Structure formats: C-alpha cells, structure tokens
Amino acid sequence: MLQQEASTMDLDIHFLDKSSDFPAGLISHNFQIGDFQNFDDVLSFGQDKDILTIEIENVNTEALKQLEADGKKVYPQPYVIEIIKDKGLQKQFYLKHSIPTSSFFIVENKNDIINKINDGSLEYPFVQKSRLAGYDGKGVVVIRCENDIVKLFNVGSVIEELIDIEKELAVIIARNEKGEINHFPITEMIFNEKGNLLDYLICPSDISENINLKSIEIAKNIITTFEMVGVLAVELFLTKKGDIIVNEVAPRTHNSGHHTIDANINSQFNLHIRSILNLSLGSTEQIRPFAALLNVLGDINSNVGPPTYHGLEEIINVNEIYPHFYGKKVVKPLRKMGHVNITATTKETLIEKINKIKNTLIVNNEES
C-alpha cells in the first residue's frame, strides 16, 4: 500500500523482505530479498538510500542506528522503534512521562507469574503480553482463572490488569521534522474474539467531544515526547468509568488507518510519506460522513493452502465498497488476507454494508 501511494508521487522506493512472493514484491520493481532482522542485510540495504522507514517494529535497530550515524535519515528514529517494539520498555515510557495506561509489572518467565499467583501478589483476571514480537493479537493472552494457566507464555512479558472496556479507540497521528502534527478522525474498533485481532472499525467513533479531545491530546503528547517523525498509531481504551488510557502504540502505518485510502482526502500512507519527506502534512478530512474497514480473514474452518475468494462479485456490485487484497499465496484460519473499505452517508447504511460483506465474502482453501 505504501508502494501504491508512492507511485503516484514518482518516488524511487525500495523494499527489503524475505521473499519476492510477499505482497510488496508483487508490485515493486525495486524489491531486495533479505532479512530485516539481520544486521548485515539491513545495513547493506540502507547504504545507498536517502531515507529509511519501516512497516513492522521487529526490525534490526542496531543496523538502523549505524545507518543513522552514517548520515542516513531513519524515520521513525531507531530509538523510538527500540522502545515501542519492547512492550516492557513501552509501558515504562508511559510511566516515566505520566501518560495514562493500565497498571503493570514485568516478568522474566512463566514461573515468575505462577509464583506471584501463589504468593497472592497477582490475582485473576489479568493479561499477559510477550515483550517482543507480538502483533495482531499474537503474544497476548487473558488469564481469567486457574484453568487458564496452561495458556501462559514462557517468555519475558508484561502483566497488566484486565481493564473493564467500554470502547477501543485508535488515533492515527503524524509528525514531520519541522514538528508539524496532523491526525485523522478517531476510529472505534471492534475485535474478533476468536483471533483477538481487529474485526472491523467505524469512523468517526461514537464518543463525546470531551473524550475525543482527550484522546487526541494523549496522541499528540506521545508523538511529541518521542519527537518521532512519521505516522504513529495510538490504541486507546475508553473504560467503563469514562477514563482514557493507552493500550499500546505502533510507529508505522496501521490496520486501524487503512480505511483512509478510500475514505479521506489523503490516506495514512500519503501522510507518512509527507512526514518523512518533511513536507506539509496535507488534509486528513473524511470525504463521507461515515467510513468503515472490515478485515478479510481466512475462514475459521479453512484448510491451509491457496486461497479462494467466495462472494467477491456480489460485494463489488455494491456502491462505496472497496476491496483490498494483499496477494498472500496461502490462506490459514483467521489469517489476514486483505480488508474492505466502506463509505456511507448514514451509520445505519454503513452497518448494513458491513454485515452484508461479513455474510457474503468468505476466503478459504477451496478444498475446505
């Protein structure tokens, strides 16, 4: 999606990833095969580039630091990536800078958690988040009772209280080198309970003006405190008590902003490019009163294999529905295969379209 946006600006953009069969490799003429977690691969890739950016946090930051020391512009900055990709460091950052978040403590392994349960210092329910390599619900588990202990990960983790959530919100915000900041309207996220990942979102969120302003202020505070350049996705909890707290952030374009491709004057990808090039951040205005994104997930009962898309023709015939498929060669249960953007003049119409797509579009292995 970044390549698609960059092509309209005639930018010379290059990609590094493990296989040219990956989505970017299908459309990029400048795709280099390599491992973005490998120091030498990242260093070699970046040596002849002017600006480097990321689309996932789990990248070799030591190589990015070296490239930055060599005079390359790296956005978001390596120290920002280093903090955010470690959920423990991320939570400590919030604590240090008085940014509202849930109470937490850090453990080294599964035994630490069990010992705290046994000595009474940890009570059910709680949430375990692996410090590293978690995304799209992976590396997160809710422990509600003793029977759930078998679900614990044996890795360094953050243990958080289980928040009584009214709504889950997201702010996509960006900052350029000059310190200019812009953001999109706040989205409201509804999650797939089986996969613990985003099912769909609605924009704008149905929240009070006070909550809206608080959410934006928190997002501005985070990106300014980091002095980060680029797009930052800020995921928030609105609690049953009416408080706004930070769940976590992602220093990149994010699933909670993909609807902007079709719903806004400029997309989050346009905003990211503008920010890392130190350009004016442009308009983030939403074109239609209501917009949504629906993740297209592999059917829960699908076999693993080449995907078949059922019901596509039927949904394409509906106005203001915009499918985006990622070109993934293998479908798995609950694997994210793409998304569908939706716009509408009323929220009722928007919900009708969401439900139609959910009931019509199925992705599975045709042998399922």
Image: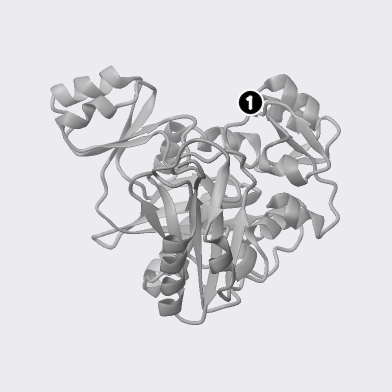
User: Outermost residue, front direction?
Assistant: 367
User: Horizontal and vertical percent for residue 331?
Assistant: 53, 41
> Is residue 340 shown left or right of residue 102?
right
> Is residue 53 shown left or right of residue 330?
right
**Mark 1: amino acid:** Gln
Q: Is residue 259 above or below residue 78?
A: below
Q: Regarding mark 1 in the picture, which secondary structure is present there?
A: loop
User: Outermost residue, bottom direction?
Assistant: 345
Whether residue 139 is visible? yes
Residue beneath label 1, please?
37
Q: Which residue is drawn at 52% across and 35% down?
A: 85
Q: Which of 24 and 77 lies nearest the eye of the viewer?
A: 24
Q: Which of 230 and 96 lies nearest the eye of the viewer?
A: 230
User: Horizontal and vertical percent for residue 17?
Assistant: 69, 33
Q: In which quarter of the image is residue 194?
A: top left
Q: Is residue 151 above or below residue 252?
A: above
